Image (spheres, rainbow, N blue to C red):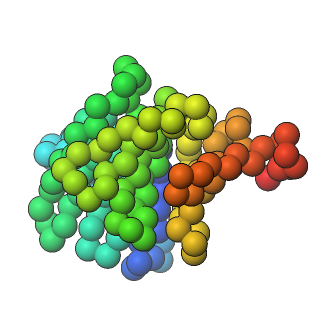
Amino acid sequence: MLFRSYSAFENASGHLLLAHDAGLQTLDPLTGRLETVLGESSLVAGPVYATRQYGEELWIVTPSGAHRRNRGQWEHFPIMFEHSLRTGMFILKDSANNVWVGDAQNKLYCNPGTDAFLPVEESELLLARGFAAVEDHEGNLWIGTPFNGVIKLQPRHVSVLSKRNGLDRKS
């Protein structure tokens, strides 16, 4: 059966975490073995839109919010997505232990080490469907968008690199 795939991430052991309509699977690229981590019968059933692993912590985004598995136990962090299409496009834990979720509807949410994800107020003006994010060595968050270039989030400052200021369309 084919599924719509949303996210892939290589963990420290070299396995690929594959997030898709039916849940989450791991793929061992050396053996080709595919193993279901989350499926229809699991506590966190349904589509998984984004996934990342940090040491023992596995983070995923589903329509109901973010979920963290640590030492085999799942913890749910509700996100009140403001749109009917509730899809998380990326999840990222930064060096300050803040967890960021970008959704497909121009919103950015942050969990500053608490039990809740809060919307970043200015993000609707800044993000145009953030699809991927990475943190650089200085602690800046770089968010890739399909139409508005690359967005750089810094403490209290945002820079947008786009075609207008020299970003090549092919980049």
Instruction: Please name the residue shown 87% across and 49% down the image.
Output: 166
Q: Say which of 1 and 83 sits in front.
A: 83
In x, y percent, where is residue 14?
A: 45, 76
Q: Quadrant of residue 47?
A: top left
Among all residues in the image, which is located at the extreme top?
84
Instruction: Please name the residue shown 79% across and 53% down the image.
Output: 171
In x, y percent, where is residue 56?
A: 26, 73
Q: Is residue 145 in view from this perspective?
A: yes
Give left or right: position of 105 versus 164: left
Q: Say which of 168 and 162 sits in front.
A: 162
Instruction: Please name the residue shown 46% across and 62% down the image.
Output: 9
Residue 23, above or below 32: above
Image label count: 0
Residue 101, above or below 28: above
Quarter of the figure that contains the N terminus: top left
Q: Is residue 21 in view from this perspective?
A: no
Q: Say which of 8 and 2 sits in front.
A: 8
In x, y percent, where is residue 35?
A: 30, 62
In x, y percent, where is residue 103?
A: 45, 37
Q: Quadrant of residue 73?
A: bottom left
Residue 57, above or below 92: below
Instruction: Please name the residue shown 57% across and 72% down the image.
Output: 138
